[in-house]
Amino acid sequence: MYALAALGLWLLYRSRAEFTGARTDRTLAANVLIGFGLWHVADALLSHWILGIHRIRQDAANPLAWDLAWLALFGLVPLAIGLLMKRRYARRAGAGALAAVVLAAGVAAALPPRGLEGPETVTVVLRPDVRPGEFLARIGASDVRVLWADQAGGVWLLTRDGDLGSRALYRAGALYVAGSLLPAGCAAWLRPA
């Protein structure tokens, strides 16, 4: 996903001469929609289907239907609208403005949420070579409560206090650690059983 974002920024930088003049805001909006749609298409293809890291609704009777709806709504529709807008308006937008927005959003997403008291809710996806029992044994001494786990034991929804950081979860066998009490993309759809 970072490579896709870097590619998008590089393409905007390369075509910076086209980002002057009238209607730059419309072309910038078109580029944002194209990037947003492409990111969700790549996420659906890679994370949901090829790598199988997670699904949109793990607990749904038909997770593929949720994946396809998410792909259509957040991937294909914005991509199509962006391409139509780009075709309609001249190629003129501010690459610097988009780069600033992307960088600011990245910094904001990396910061932990403020003002939250109590334990933090996190989603943990285990590496394929780590068994659930090994993972629990490695984090057993910490103050962690399991809210939900999938049947195979590869995806966990935990509450943790400040004693157990993300690095410790990665050392214990996590492939992916994400979450807060705020919506976190696809991981926000996970619900405790």
Image (cartoon, rainbow, N blue to C red):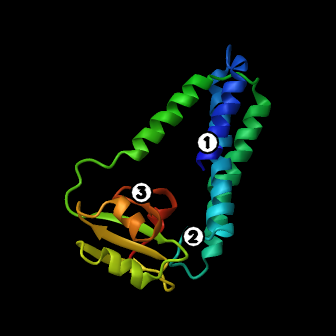
- Tag 2, which secondary structure? loop
Q: CA distance from mark 2 to mark 1?
A: 22 Å
- Tag 1, which secondary structure? helix
| Res. 107 image quadrant | top left
Q: Quadrant of the C terminus?
A: bottom left
Q: Which residue is mark 1?
A: 5
Q: Nearer the viewer, mark 3 or mark 2?
A: 2
The correct choice, above or below, for 119 with respect to 7 in the image is: below
User: Mark 3 or mark 2, which has the lower sequence index?
Assistant: 2
Q: CA distance from mark 3 to mark 2?
A: 15 Å
Nearer to the camera, 172 or 97: 172
Nearer to the camera, 64 or 152: 152
Q: Residue 45 in the image: state x and y as whole percent.
A: 69, 62
Residue at image point 57% right, 68% down: 53
Relative side of 178 to 79, left or right: left
- Tag 3, which secondary structure? loop
Relative side of 78 to 166, left or right: right
Q: Which residue is mark 2?
A: 55
Label 3: how many Cα within 10 Å (few below 14, some 14–19, many 20+): few
User: Mark 2 or mark 1, which has the lower sequence index?
Assistant: 1
The correct choice, above or below, for 138 with respect to 70 in the image is: below
Q: Residue 38 in the image: state x and y as whole percent.
A: 68, 48
Q: CA distance from mark 3 to mark 1?
A: 21 Å
User: Which amino acid lies under the numbered mark 3 shown in the image of this protein?
Assistant: Pro
User: Which amino acid lies under the numbered mark 1 shown in the image of this protein?
Assistant: Ala
Q: Nearer the viewer, mark 3 or mark 1?
A: 1
Q: Which residue is mark 3?
A: 183
Label 1: how many Cα within 10 Å (few below 14, some 14–19, many 20+): some
User: Which amino acid lies under the numbered mark 2 shown in the image of this protein?
Assistant: Arg
Label 2: how many Cα within 10 Å (few below 14, some 14–19, many 20+): many
Q: Residue 120 in the image: state x and y as whole percent.
A: 29, 62
